[in-house]
Amino acid sequence: MQALAVFPSQKRFGLLDIPEPQLSGATQVLLRLCEVGLCGTDREIASFEYGDPPSGADHLILGHESLAEVVELGREVRSLKRGDLVVAMVRRPCPHAECRACRAGRPDFCVTGDYTERGIKGADGFLTDYVVEDEKYLVRVPRALADVAVLVEPLSVVTKAADQAHAIFDRLSYDPGPQRGLVLGAGPIGLLGAMVLVANGFETLVYSRDSEESKPAELVRSLGAHYASSTIDPIEGLGTRWGQFDLIFEAVGFAPLMVGATQMLRANGVLALTGVPPKAATVELNAGRVLRDLVLRNQVVFGTVNAGRRDHLSAIQHLEQFMVLFPESVRTLITHRVPLDEVPQILTQKRGIKDVVEMTRAA
Ligand SMILES: [Zn+2]
Ligand SMILES: [Zn+2]
């Protein structure tokens, strides 16, 4: 069978033939991939900026946003049956006994950094026909979501952030009244963030560099949210024009915007950061003002990465809700579906909103 792999030491990527995997453990599951989503992380790995092959290998099979069908089960698998649709979680625990997060099944909170990630860091991904995975890393998805379930993995990153923000808002033991949300960035994560905010009753603004006539802007308006483009609204004037926000969800990774966002928070506001800026990004900062506000206005800034099982389950619930509230907007997120052999041509170009690789159609 074919797989799409990156060879970092040779600075190349392409299709290669690999043997079909077989079950070798009682809790393993053989999966046939239906779809695999591509994102900025894949483009970074294909540009050799990021990503590590499994130890001892010269290549990494790409793909971490999976949707697959169960075709064969190890004899001790209890939670799944043949024909189930599943999404695989991405991160796998580190080997260290002292890492309580990994030992407790939450490698998304790993403290050692020695975790692996399928398709990203030290473990092969899902851009191939069949993979074997342990039952405990699989999350079952309702068939009714088949045509959009490839969004569960990226959405789980958003729901992890949203559920943490919710836990912070729980400190207010009174009804704070109507809440306002700002999303920075209109890529797939930002747009999914806007959907979560709208679904949770926030009056929502999405701010991005895409023009007011762009597809993402149209999608935002289709949710009943507002859209502002940095081509018209420079960041300095955003607060004057749009006011301040209770929850800001950042999905850009642009350091000046991440720091500037603190100045757009209302009292008791929460800023969730999910973008990853380059290490060398420096920003001039009035630290006194930012820190003063954090203290005197009870503000919280937190970063969040990856997701655990409960975040995937929350993502599935949210996706079900989205398919009632704005099904066409959700479908519009997936702008292209391509077969595996076309991936090498499109991998490093950003086009549309979300590219999805069609492996086999969900039956
Ligand atoms: Zn991704
Ligand atoms: Zn760990």
Image (spheres, helix red, strand yellow):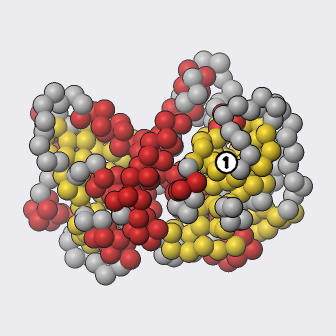
For the point 78% across and 59% down, the residue is 129
For the point 60% across and 18% down, the residue is 98
Whether residue 296 can be seen here? yes
Q: Position of residue 155 (x, y in %)?
A: 46, 51
- Indicate if the residue with disc 1 has its beta carbon within 8 Å of ligand 1: no
Q: Which residue sits furthest top?
A: 98
Q: Which residue sits furthest bottom?
A: 213
Q: Is residue 260 above or below residue 170?
A: below
| Quarter of the image that includes the C terminus | bottom right
Q: Is residue 163 above or below residue 69?
A: above
Hey, which quadrant is residue 135 in on the image? top right
Q: Position of residue 344 (x, y in %)?
A: 70, 73
For the point 52% across and 61% down, the residue is 148
Q: Is residue 296 above or below residue 204?
A: above
> Residue tagged by mark 1?
84
Q: Position of residue 81 (x, y in %)?
A: 71, 41
Is 316 situated left or right of 259 in this image?
right
Hey, which quadrant is residue 138 in on the image? top right
Q: Which residue sits furthest right?
A: 19
Q: Secondary structure at mark 1?
A: loop
Is 286 situated left or right of 353 in this image?
left
> Which kind of residue does numbered mark 1 sit on?
Asp
Q: Nearer the viewer, residue 136 or 186?
A: 136
Judge the density around disc 1: few (<14), some (14-19), many (≥20) Cα neighbours within 10 Å. Answer: some
Q: Position of residue 152 (x, y in %)?
A: 52, 52
| Quarter of the image that includes the N terminus | bottom right
Whether residue 157 can be seen here? no
Is 344 situated left or right of 231 in this image?
right
